[in-house]
Each structure stands twice: as C-alpha cells, then as structure tokens.
Amino acid sequence: MKKFTNLFILTHILFMLSLLPVYAKEIIVPVEKIQVRVIVGSTSAFTGVAFDINLKNAMPDGINIDREAFALDKNNLPRFEIRDADDKIAFELNRSLIGAALYIIQMVDSKPDIIDALSNQTNYIFMSDPIKIKLSNGDFIVITPEVLKEATLKKIFLSEENRQRLIAARGGAQTLYQNKIDFGIKADVADSSRRVFALSFSYYGTPVESVAWWRFAAKGYVSSDKNDPISEIHLFPLTVGHVFGLENGKPFETGEVRGYFGIEGNQTFRKSRLNASFYYTTLLPNFIDLTFGSPNRLRLNPVIKFGAEYWDEINDNTKPDALQKGGKIGVEIYYYIPVMENYSLLVEGNFGYTLGKKFKEKNNVNDFISHFNVTLGYEVPGSDMKVLATYSFGQNDINFTEDTRLLLGLAINLFKSVEEL
C-alpha cells in the first residue's frame, strides 16, 4: 500500500510541476560571436555606407530565428548612434534590422559630415537599450549596448580609398557615367503575334576609373528584328579626358571634359561611320524631390552635356557610292529621380543641330533632331533588378528614323560597386 502511495505522490508532483510556467532562457551574445563589416556601396539609386552586424555565429546549433516574432519586433528597436571613444555623438542612425539571416544594417548616404565622421578610427555604434531576438525554441538571444560597443569600437571607419570613393559619388557625381542595361519586349509592333525583344545599354566608366585619362565607352539599342530601323550601336574604344571637382560634388563645379573616338552604326553595321566627338559634362542643381522623406534614397543631380560630333560615313548599303561627312552640335540631359522607397523615374533627352549640307540631303535629315526616353521603374527589393516601362519618341542619330515605342522589361544594374572594408 505504501508503494502505491509513494507512486501517487510522485505522479502528483510531476503533474503539478508540468503546470508551472517554463521560463525562456536569455542568451547574452559574447563579443567574439559578433562579426562587424562596413560596406561601401554605389548603385544608380543609392550611394553610401552600410553597417553590417552579423550574428549568425551567435545562434545555437540547429536553432533559428522565430521569423514571425522577428517581423513584429524589428519595428521596436532601440536608438542607434555613431559615437567616438569620448561618447561624442557623430550622427544618429535610422533604426533598421532586416532579414531572417539576422543583420543589423544601416544605409548612410555620402554627405560630407558623415564622410568626415567615419574617418575617425575611434568610432563605435551606440545602442540605447538591449536587443532581444526570439528564437524558434522560445529562448532569446540578447545584444547589450556594452557588447555592441566593444564589438564595433575602432572597427567602423573608412579607409582613405573608400573615403575618396564616397567623395566622388557625393551629390550624384556617379551619374556622370550613366551606366545601365535594359532588356524587354517592344510593345508597339504592328503584328501582335510577333514578339520583338530589345536591349538598350550604355557604359561610360565608373567613379573609380575617373582618375584615368583613358577609358572605353559604349551605348546602343538593338533588337531581335535585324532590320530594326531605329537600332544603333556606338563603340568608343578610345576616350580621352579629365574629370574635375569630384571633391566638391556640386552643380557646375563637378564635371568632365572628354573626347570620344570610335565607330557607330545600325546593329548590322550596313550603315556605319567613324565618330570623333567632344563633350563637356557637368551637374545641374537638383530641383525635383519625389522621395517623400524616404531615408535610403540618394537624390542624384541631373547631368547635362554640351558638345559637337564629326561624322565620316564608311558604309551605307542603300547609297554605297554617296558617302558623306557630317556632324552635329548637341545637348543631352540625364536625370535619375528616385520615387518613394522602391520606384524611380529616368528622363533622358538629346537635342542636336545637324551639320553638312550634302550629308543632310543624302540622309533626308532635318536641321534639328531630338530624342527622348522616359522610364518608370520599380526596384525589386534585395536585388539589382528593376521592372520598367520605357516610352521613347524622336529620331536616333544613325538612320534618323522618327519613331515612338514602348519597351516593357527589366533593368539590370551590372555596374554596381560594393566593397567590404
């Protein structure tokens, strides 16, 4: 009887213990488990610095983040500041904790005061309160302000090379280079059963290459229709010039003078010519703001180019015995406008006065020619791709064919520059 009584008591105790609340453990993340990176990045939509605090190594084996809880908690973060060793505040960071891989990351644009502050090698990241992140087993990992300070102290400064890169990019100076690749389907083909794929591209170098007196350049529009009357390819294996005022990044004080030497024609080069041209490029004041206060969009200055071109025809399958020399005096504008958090508007236009009486008669060219592109894009979060719609109208510089077209497709930022310090 006593044996059964003891068993009853033990069972009762176990049952009562099971009713007691189970308290989650709070695991304090040690300094050695935190990996710190400072990333300098440049895209067509953003140039700046990211602070990447990676906590992957702090996760217990086989345990992941409670993603549902993480999505709710990441909007209730403490205050982050960049401070020096004497606790003087350099600037405050916008709160952002993103991704289930567990990164604390903050994009900072390339304003002069921020560049100067990040040149201080004694900085650290200050956090007003601990961060608690729930795990899939119900426990929490905790990052304390003291641990974050020790993990980031003297580790979040810019090297001189990357400091110069940000200076070069400040104010949108990287838009001097107008680099892009757009791929899509022409939506204005008369025969709707026939699809025509098109590719538009341009490459004029990068801010890193700006110190070089020589570089390659190219631009064009090609399609799967081999007889596309508006196709054009411009190849400049030799460009010679000088960039000035990158340390200022200001309208009219930052720009480039450059000569271009190359060949251009339609996509089959059955109509082609040599090109020698000279352009002066500079930034204009930024006069449109459609970001609506979004902190992670850098407003790029519009770019304007003035110049002249000399053309010497070397092939024309329609009039092979009537090759001529001509040219134009032209103005081009390029304005990338970020819209809210993930949208963008790109306006491109060129105006020209054509030269050479015989050239104009032979090619049936008006004195004045112009062409415009207006592109509305949606930037896919977490990628370098953009869904876009481009509306174009006017004449190109090769066949001088007047055309209106709509291109639906993707833009790929192949020329992004990202470096880890």
Image: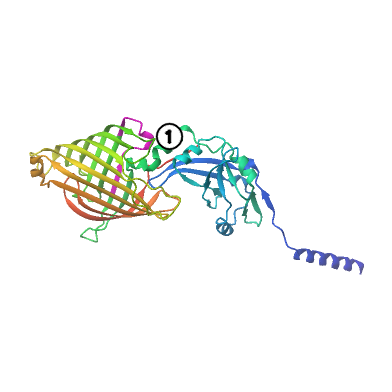
Q: Position of residue 290 (x, y in %)?
A: 37, 54
Name the kind of residue labelled 1 in the image: Gln
Q: Is residue 112 magenta?
A: no
10 Å neighbourhood of mark 1: few (<14), some, or many (≥20)? some
Q: Position of residue 286 (x, y in %)?
A: 34, 47
What residue is shown at x 12% (from left), y 42% (from top)? 317
Q: Which residues are magenta?
A: 199-215
Element carrying mark 1: helix
Q: Is residue 212 magenta?
A: yes
Image quadrant containing the N terminus: bottom right
Q: Position of residue 296 (x, y in %)?
A: 45, 50
Give left or right: position of 337 versus 221: right
Q: Position of residue 402 (x, y in %)?
A: 17, 52
Q: Residue 248's quadrant in the figure?
A: top left
What residue is shown at x 57% (from left), y 53% (from top)? 77
76 shown above or below 364: below
Give left or right: position of 153 versus 45: right
Identity of the residue furthest to the bottom in this view: 1
Identity of the residue furthest to the right in this view: 2
Check disc 1 and report the residue beneath it.
164
Q: Residue 406's quadrant in the figure?
A: bottom left
